[in-house]
Amino acid sequence: MENKSSSVDTGQQIRRPGTEGLEEAQAKQAGAKFEWHFGRITRLGYFEIAGGREVTIVWEEGGVSSQQGDITDEQWEIFRLAFLSTGRLAVLSDQEGERWMHDYRFLEAMR
């Protein structure tokens, strides 16, 4: 099967076989240092007095992260959708070390 991609003014359309091609194309568009990280949301919570929304994620690469507060409405919706379906989440980040575990600029709920 031939790999095709075409660009339009309002975005970019990518047609490639398999999810690896899509992940590669998205990371390439974001920049050379961006990498995908995958995890599973194990807990969501809302604590009005203690700082607002909370999410806990177990990462496939090892480790657990928990964020309480500083979660936007858009990020919360993606976390909620992931939690209510498969629990799986993908983060695209250029942060080094373990800082990517709290980099929620590029989030995806996964099936």
Image (cartoon, grey):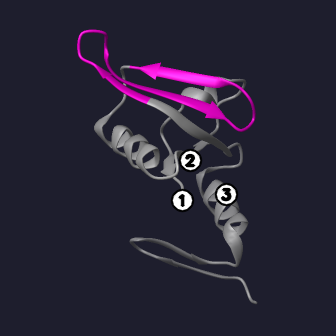
Outermost bottom residue: 1
Q: Position of residue 76 (x, y in %)?
A: 35, 38
Residue drawn at x 52%, y 37% as measured from the top left = 41
Q: Which mark sits nearer the N-terminus, 1 or 2?
A: 2
Q: Is residue 86 above or below residue 19?
A: above
Q: Quadrant of residue 80?
A: top left
Q: Quadrant of residue 96?
A: top right
Q: Main secondary structure of the magenta part?
A: strand
Q: Which is in the foreground here, disc 1 or disc 3?
A: 1
Q: Which residue is mark 2?
A: 88
Part of the protein shown in magenta = 44-68
Relative placement, left or right, of 49 versus 8 is left
Task: Look at the image and tell me in which quarter the C terminus lies.
Answer: bottom right
Q: Which residue is mark 3?
A: 28
Q: Is residue 65 above or below residue 75?
A: above
Q: Which residue is mark 1?
A: 111
**What's under tag 3, amino acid-wise?**
Lys
Residue drawn at x 36%, y 25% as measured from the top left = 45
**What's under tag 1, amino acid-wise?**
Arg
Disc 2 secondary structure class: strand
Residue 62 in magenta stretch:
yes
Disc 1 secondary structure class: loop
Decide which of 8, 22 is in the foreground and name it.
22
Disc 3 secondary structure class: helix
Marks 1 and 3, how far apart in space? 22 Å
Q: Which mark sits nearer the N-terminus, 2 or 3?
A: 3
Q: Residues within 10 Å of mark 1 (few under 14, many from 20)?
A: few
Q: Is residue 47 above or below residue 22?
A: above
Decide which of 64, 107 is in the foreground and name it.
64
Residue drawn at x 71%, y 38% as measured from the top left = 60
